[in-house]
Image: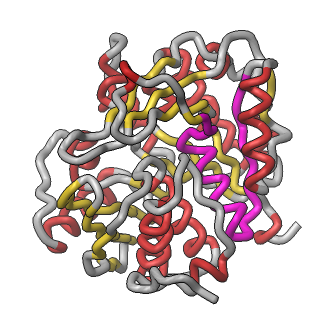
Amino acid sequence: MTDEEKPVVCFGEVLIRLSATTGIPLAAADKLGLAAGGAEANVAAALAGLGISARVLTCLPENPLGRRAIAAIRASGADARFCVSGPGRIGLYFYEPPAGLVAGRVTYDREGSAFSRATAQTLPITDALNGGRLLHMSGITPALGPGGTALARAAMKAAHDAGVPVSFDCNYRANLWSAWDSDPRSVLTELIGGAEIMFGNHRDISLLLGQTFSGEGPDRRREAAEAAFAAFPGLKLIASTARRVESGGVHHLAARVDTRGDHWQTAEMKVENIVDRIGTGDAFAAGVLYAHLSGDGVREAARSGLALAALKHGVAGDQIVIAREELAAFRPDASDIRR
């Protein structure tokens, strides 16, 4: 099996998203749109669309909602063979899109999910990593509670035992961590210590290292990256975005990729007519991984991540699935109809 044929294994909880109509608060909604998502599954879907072999490792209930989630994974082109069944429910989240001056809001309902009740013994972690090219996971899994932390540690150990490098998205969720007697800094520091690729900005690095770094300007962001490289000897690449919100429908986005010997930060891109912001960080991660796994340098990784994240703002739902030709052809000002 060539490196190109080896799969990226995306490990985490798959959720069902229920979205209110724009402009109608959830408390007044009488209909909800349904879609499947979840950070790691979103990355798998985007990578599969770009022609990178990807598989999803998770646990779902054996019921119509679980089957709906698996159908979405398969429809994206990702491998769903390691999505196993287990007792419990599927995690839900409710999304109220931003409208005018009203900010968007997410309400989680995921306690007691099949994934959160799974254990390393009930998940086929070793089998899923067999022949794997990369394990991608995020800080959402350990934030779910002691069981989630145990799962994240087990997946990390299995990847190391199998010689599979790890990509870790900090994805810090304060509400999840605060719901139990947690120590996010300690847990995330341990997990980042086992990763080669980190998705996180200067605020994440500040949390991990217990010191404050400024995000003002490329030099200060490089300072944060160098501190992370010094603290985590196995870390090879750090990728992040900077977002400036002008309004609910207009954001400004820039991307940055740092390695130990090189770094690049893109110019800020104006993203208008936003349809859906959810999943844009996962799209960014997929774009960076796509370029990195293709052997490209920091400039192309930053450009690819920014382009896919920008495109995701115009796609409803958690996921974006586009062909690599579409990504390569992306231009920030090319929003007219292509004929």
State yes or no: residue 51 in magenta. Answer: yes
Q: Residue 307 vs residue 269: left or right?
A: right
User: Compared to 263, does 104 lie above or below?
Assistant: above
Vertical arrangement, residue 18 with respect to residue 256, above or below: above
Q: Is residue 113 magenta?
A: no
Residue at 29% in and 45% down:
99
Where the N terminus falls, by quadrant?
bottom right
Q: Residue at x 39, y 63 (%)?
A: 239
Give me the residue at 35% from left, 61% from top: 240
Give the side of residue 196 with respect to residue 259, left or right: right
Quadrant location of the C terminus in the rendered image: bottom right
Q: Is residue 40 above or below residue 15?
A: below
Q: Position of residue 276 (x, y in %)?
A: 43, 52
Percent position of residue 16, x then y: 60, 30
- Where does the magenta region start and end? 34-60
Confirm whether residue 284 shows in the render: no
Q: Position of residue 232 (x, y in %)?
A: 37, 52
Residue occupying image coordinates x 15% and y 60%: 215
For the residue pair 164 and 202, the one nearer the viewer reads as: 202
Q: Quadrant of residue 12?
A: top right
Which quarter of the figure has residue 71?
top right
Instruction: Give the percent coordinates (x, y) of residue 188.
Output: 39, 36
**Who is closer to the viewer here, 128 or 14?**
14
